[in-house]
Image: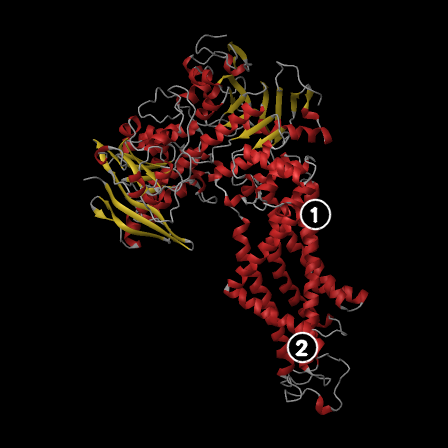
Amino acid sequence: MTGPQPAGEPLVRVADLRVEFPVRGGARNADGSKPVVHAVDGVSFDLERGEVLALVGESGCGKTTIAKTMVRLIDPSGGRIEYRGRDITRLTGKELRHLRERFQLVFQDPYESLDPRQTVYEIVSEPLVIHGRGKDLADRMRLVFAALEGAGLHPAAEIAGRYPHHLSGGQRQRVAIAAAMVLEPELIVADEPVSMLDVSFRAEILSLMLELRAQRQFTYLFITHDLSLAWVIADRIAVVYLGRIVEIGPADDVIQRPTHPYTRALVSVIPVPEPGAETDQIVLTGEAPSPSAIPPGCRFHPRCWLRRDLGGPAICSTEDPRLAPVGPGRTVACHFPEGGTPR
Amino acid sequence: MTAVTYGATGRLGRVGASFRTNWALLWADRLGRVGVILLVIVFLAALLGPLLFPFDPKAVGRSATDLLQPPSATAWLGTDEMGRQVIWETIAGARTSLTVGLVATAISMVVGTFIGLTAGYSRGTMGEGLMRVTDFFLVIPTLPLTIVLAALIGQSLGVIILVIGLTSWPATARIVRSQVLSLRERQFIVRIQSLGATDLRTVGIHILPNILPLVFANTVLVIAGSILAEATLAFLGLGDPVNVSWGTMLHFAFQSGAAGRGAWWYIIPPGVGIVVTVLGFVLVGHALDRILNPRLRNR
Amino acid sequence: MALLEVRDLTIRYRTTAGEIRAVDAASLDVDAGEAVGLAGESGCGKTTTALAIPGLLPVNAQVVSGSIRLDGRELLGRSEAEMEKIRWREVSVVFQGAMNALNPVRRVDEQIAEPIRLLEPETTSKAARARVDELMERVGIPAARGREYPHEFSGGMRQRVMIAMALACRPKLIIADEPVTALDVMVQAQILRLLKDLRAQLGLAMILISHDLSVIAETCDRAVVMYAGRTAESGDVRAIFRSPAHPYTQALIRAFPNVRRERTFVSGIPGYPPDLMAPLVGCPFADRCIVRIDRCRAETPALRPVGPAHDVACHLVGEAAS
């Protein structure tokens, strides 16, 4: 983990990441091999410093697994994650601990992510204690209070003495953010940070996250299944399906001019607070197949409406499309990204 | 806020405060209060009784008429088959029964909690291996083990304590393990691991305090079981012949034919002693379970 | 006359800590075949209001006053035995988190048949089988899967099972409590479309409870927005969303992104909902309202018309504003 990076380099570069889990106690495949869940099946993307990249997709698509692998809560089965020129997938011991100071995770459930037996002070100071920051109690108190204030909790000294169950959901999430901030990380991976909060409290947490990005140069990997939320907060959106990124590009572009048939279907069914605004909805039938039985060729082809419209071209079931550019900063993994014009 | 609220002293202060709250809740619980009162009586008898009225096992009766006498002005609970006063025996027996119960439970809880924690937190073969060890000890029958050990080492309190400890820790280990298994997957534990906390820290600071209430409630019930176990083993003749306990009293009562001769004053006091003590612990244990359990699922 | 008429319903919860004003003078109309959305955030009283209809409130709930008329018949005050005849046969419920409400050790087709067996015991098993098959087809479950167990179904499929169960005895009204909240957006679209089709085919009326205004905008004909137990705004869904009159409704709509419009950041509402144990003084939204005046803190606004099929409870709007 050497010194400052050359400008223009992405903060993190993920290359062909794979995460596989063996299926326990399942029957063997037809060819005798043991079934494996390909939770992440070859994911590559760059995370630019200071950006908010949203990973969107339905449950089971692998977005949470990608997030956890970035912070080494899960070890990948293959591929590279480069940070400051080093591949962090191989780190152990002291270097791994250093990484943990730089990459923080904010969880979904504000009621579950805090130890009910710890006070707010203990929760926020624990990262300092684990990594040996702060010379003494007074120094740590100073850092903790600064983090609490930075997360919008006032008066910090009073809140620090309270227990989580005395705080509202929004306040608890702020505590979780303070605990993530206190080590001054570079990357924060936020897994559905507002989905369990009441709607009227989401904006303040989202604004807080953006403010912190502006003030402290945080970079965010924002995991969500809520496409409209990603549209509002992210700079770029990556759409994940069955362990693979199928489309990635600027947030507004991906939502307003989606290219991949899966993205187009998802975007068409996003509900809006405007009666009568539904345009032609593309409602896919069935649900995504299990990641232990990924379809051959393009993994989306069995459910793809575009393939049907085009008369079932053979390439979709035989060849796995790679992510390829379709515009400035936009890549799509589809053989017919313009909806009819074959590549 | 002064610095004393934070750091280690702050934590101790908060432990003390939660102790006081739980105590108040225990007292407010009707059955819990009854249990506490019963235990206070028993403990007072055990602690103060022998000090005020020491029991001398050599103070045997001088003539036949002193033996197995019904209660009278001189002997409030009558005499046993050796002419000794049943009341002093009963009070002395309290001390023995409680000692065995508490020490055996202490061994059982420490071993059981430690193994349960390790088995629940470790993944893979370590966890499985420990559970097989637990299963092994779980199925050991108490009585044959006592007989074998008594034959090898001799009958003593130590043997009884050892046997009860060895055969009761598996139940605790299983309870602790299942609780740790569910705790291990909770988001705050995963978060703390993602921060880089060592396993020792995770278990010691996060998991242990969250299972302690459960362990504590369980301990009280295990004490009740241990006392009953001691009484059973002693009654069957495997107790310490030198130290009088309620179980040995019952043993000698039956051996000397007290039941046949209608010497109820010899049988009832130790029986009542056992019942009262066990009931006291059970009532308190269940009350603690009621108090502490809803808070385990903190929201 | 509407199929369901709820008038001035007031419900309290008795707890060891005090009394909670869960619902305060709520009114609601549902016509046959119509979908009415009950909107609001946690604790606003929407679920309590709806569950009072089939009499499914918890023991510590007390209906203080008000009336609930189904087809002209008063439901409040009826005995449990009488309510049992109404539940499932006239009004049925798809509960929140329903997909976890299935019995894991019984087959799915048996569970769908259960309401029929229990409530219409005179039905022969052949007729019941036929009904179950028909229901499964209606909700989009392949007939062969009836023999499977709940854990073999996905969340969306289990929700379909719950809907089939709710339809088993041919009710006139379904109450769906957050039916799509835990589901992915595509499965959500499938279920909402299913509900829409079922309503059209069976002439079913529906009360849809949701904190998600977008879902209500998409599926309902009319909506009732609740806040702290009181009705803030109610009426035709187009009127409410196009020209929301209550400051809370306006703020709440702004909290939901609209991908069909310009990209603006969502806004929130500062402050917290009021303590429902304290007595109500003035408008419950006053503390957080950006346009409040003195009158708002002193006087609780009544629900008044502000347009055809559009009522609001706010001093600054409609007839009340002068």
Rendered image: mark on residue C112: none
Pointers 2 and 1 in contact (C-beta within 8 Å): no
Q: Is residue A152 above or below residue A47?
A: below
Q: Around disc 1, counting alpha carbons within 10 Å, would you say few (fewer than 14), some (14 to 19), or many (20 or more)?
A: some
Q: Answer yes or no: are tags 2 and 1 on the same subunit.
A: yes
User: For the point 45% across and 24% down, which residue is it?
Assistant: A227
Mark 2 or 1, closer to the camera: 2
- C84 relative position to A306: left or right: left
Q: Around disc 2, counting alpha carbons within 10 Å, would you say few (fewer than 14), some (14 to 19), or many (20 or more)?
A: many
Is residue C144 in view?
Answer: no
Q: Is residue A189 above or below residue B254?
A: above
Chain designation of label 2:
B
> Looking at the image, which is closer to me, C191 or A96?
A96
> Looking at the image, which is closer to me, B140 or C32?
C32
Residue at the extreme left of the image, as rendered: C1
User: For the point 74% across and 62% down, which residue is it?
Assistant: B162
- Mark 2 sits on what residue? B90
Q: Secondary structure at mark 2?
A: helix
Q: CA distance from mark 2 to mark 1?
A: 41 Å
- Mark 1 sits on what residue? B130
Q: Estimate the x, y position of residue A73 in percent, counting from the top left.
A: 63, 32
Splitting the image into 4 quarters, where does residue C171 fall?
Answer: top left
User: For the point 63% across and 50% down, which residue is it?
Assistant: B176
The residue type indicated by label 1 comes to Leu
Q: Estimate the x, y position of residue B21 in percent, counting from the top left.
A: 55, 57
Q: Estimate the x, y position of residue B64 in percent, counting from the top left.
A: 73, 91
The residue type indicated by label 2 comes to Thr
- Comes first in the chain, label 2 or label 1: 2
User: For the point 70% across and 74% down, which residue is it?
Assistant: B248
Splitting the image into 4 quarters, where does residue B150 fall?
Answer: bottom right
